Image (cartoon, rainbow, N blue to C red):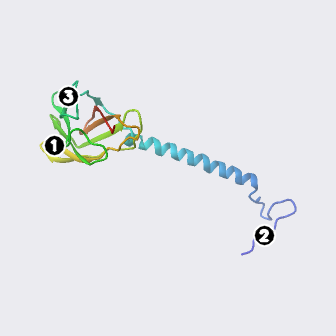
Amino acid sequence: MQLPALADNGVFPSGERPVTALNKKILIDAIGILLIALVVVVGYKLSPILLPKADLTVEPEPGCDLHRRACKALLPGGGSIELSSSVQPIPMVKPFTVQVVVRGLAPSRVMVDFAGIDMNMGLNRPELLDQGDGRFVAEATLPVCITGWMDWQATVLVETGSQRIAVPYRFSGGHD
């Protein structure tokens, strides 16, 4: 197939104009704007996964030390959420079992989000498996911070059919 030749005025015999460098620039700019809009929409849609919002945040009992024992938070309407580690103190760079015991609720999903307080250590949010009788377990591994000791927050996220409850437990860990 042969393309028709341009007339002297730069127009095809059918009256159409060819794509010019200016038209290509506008097309590239439009594609760039659409890609930026796509990134914004995808980021907005994924934000609940990366930064979960809680309907209710409950503080754990004061003075609790996860390096020594299980820590419990009492829920306002009755019931509790307890977090414990299979190894005390909680190790860095070694797998350990994390356990959450939920009383007074029927959770559909339980996760523990481990986050560095002063330094982003990446997404580390294992979903715990239901063992029955309100007990949920998973294996977790905490990365070591090259600067030494650091403060951690282990936020237990409990989802029920109607709400998401968050319990932020804090502890320190690392190497000397």
Residue in view at x 25 percent, y 36 percent: 162
Residue type, mark 2 in image: Pro
Going from N to C along the chain, the mark reached first, 3 or 2, is 2
Name the image quarter holding the C terminus: top left
Residue in view at x 81 percent, y 60 percent: 11
Which mark is on residue 135? Answer: 1
Residue 137: x and y in percent read 20, 46
Which mark is on residue 4? Answer: 2
The residue wearing badge 3 is 75
Q: Which of the two residues, 173 or 76, is positioned nearer the viewer here? A: 173
Mark 2–mark 1 CB contact (< 8 Å): no
Going from N to C along the chain, the mark reached first, 2 or 1, is 2
Q: Residue furthest top?
A: 62
Local SS, label 1: strand
Local SS, label 3: loop
Q: Residue furthest left?
A: 133
Residue 167: x and y in percent read 27, 32
Residue type, mark 3 in image: Leu
Report crowding for label 3: few under 14, some 14 to 19, many 20 or more residues within 10 A (C-alpha).
Answer: some
